[in-house]
Image (cartoon, rainbow, N blue to C red):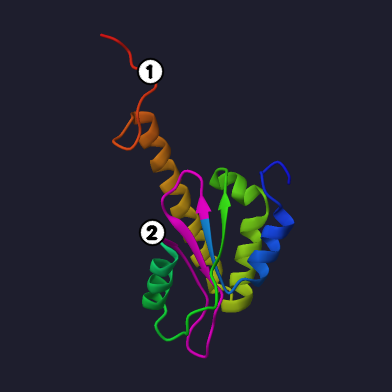
Amino acid sequence: MDDYGLDLDEVARVIAAAEVLVVRFAILDKRLLIDARTSDTEGPVIAVVPKASSVEERFKALKKLRPRLPLPEKIMSFMWPRQMETFRDSGLWDKIEGRMVSLGGEQMLEVCKAVFEELEREEKAEVVAAIRGSETYQSLWERSG
């Protein structure tokens, strides 16, 4: 364990080896999907996807997203307990980017950048919703009249 609350070396090994990886984030409902499977006609996929209610639902969504590829034997997953900025600072994002580029070429850099920016926007929106006390949050203190 380290400052991030998980074993970064172990997570790095999963990033390097997993066919399909889903990263869950502490404050986001969205997930990061990394699908390293490729074929003659398909490159790797990295995308922000909705939370699945079950493993079966995740496999179905994956089949819909990549119909020409067989389903993987398993989908790996881990929870990132901190903010997106610390995800980048930990070096794990660089490992994800590196793997995507090695599998899909330099154009994957732009895709990865767009995905990371989307995750940052989602996180910022979630923080703003929490501060404003939107429907899914409740205020601990409220100013009285």
Q: Residue at x 39, y 22 (%)?
A: 140
The part of the chain drawn in magenta is: 24-49
Amino acid at the residue labelled 1? Trp
Q: Nearer the viewer, residue 75 or 39?
A: 75
Q: Is residue 57 above or below residue 127?
A: below
| Dots 2, 1 in contact, CB < 8 A | no
Residue occupying the far top of the picture: 145
Query: Looking at the image, which residue sits at the far left?
Result: 145
Mark 2: give few (<14), some (14-19) or many (20+) Cα within 10 Å. few
Describe the element under mark 1 as helix, strand or loop.
loop
Instruction: Tell me the number on the disc at residue 141.
Output: 1
Disc 2 versus disc 1: distance between alpha carbons? 32 Å
98 lies above or below 142: below
Question: Per the image, is 45 magenta?
Answer: yes
Mark 2 vs 1, N-terminal side: 2
Q: Amino acid at mark 2?
A: Ser
Identity of the residue furthest to the bottom in this view: 40
Question: Left or right: where does residue 58 sit relative to residue 132?
Answer: right
Residue named by callout 2: 53
Q: Name the residue at 51% across, 45% down.
A: 26
Question: How far from the left and from the top, in percent, is residue 44?
Answer: 52, 76
As drawn, is 51 to the left or to the right of 90?
left
Residue 3 marker: none
The residue drawn where x is 28% and y is 36% is 135
The residue under the point 65% across, 56% down is: 92
Q: Residue 70: where, in percent of width, then height?
A: 47, 85
Instruction: Answer with the quarter of the image where residue 51 lies.
Output: bottom left
Quarter containing the C terminus: top left
Q: Residues within 10 Å of mark 1 (few under 14, many from 20)?
A: few
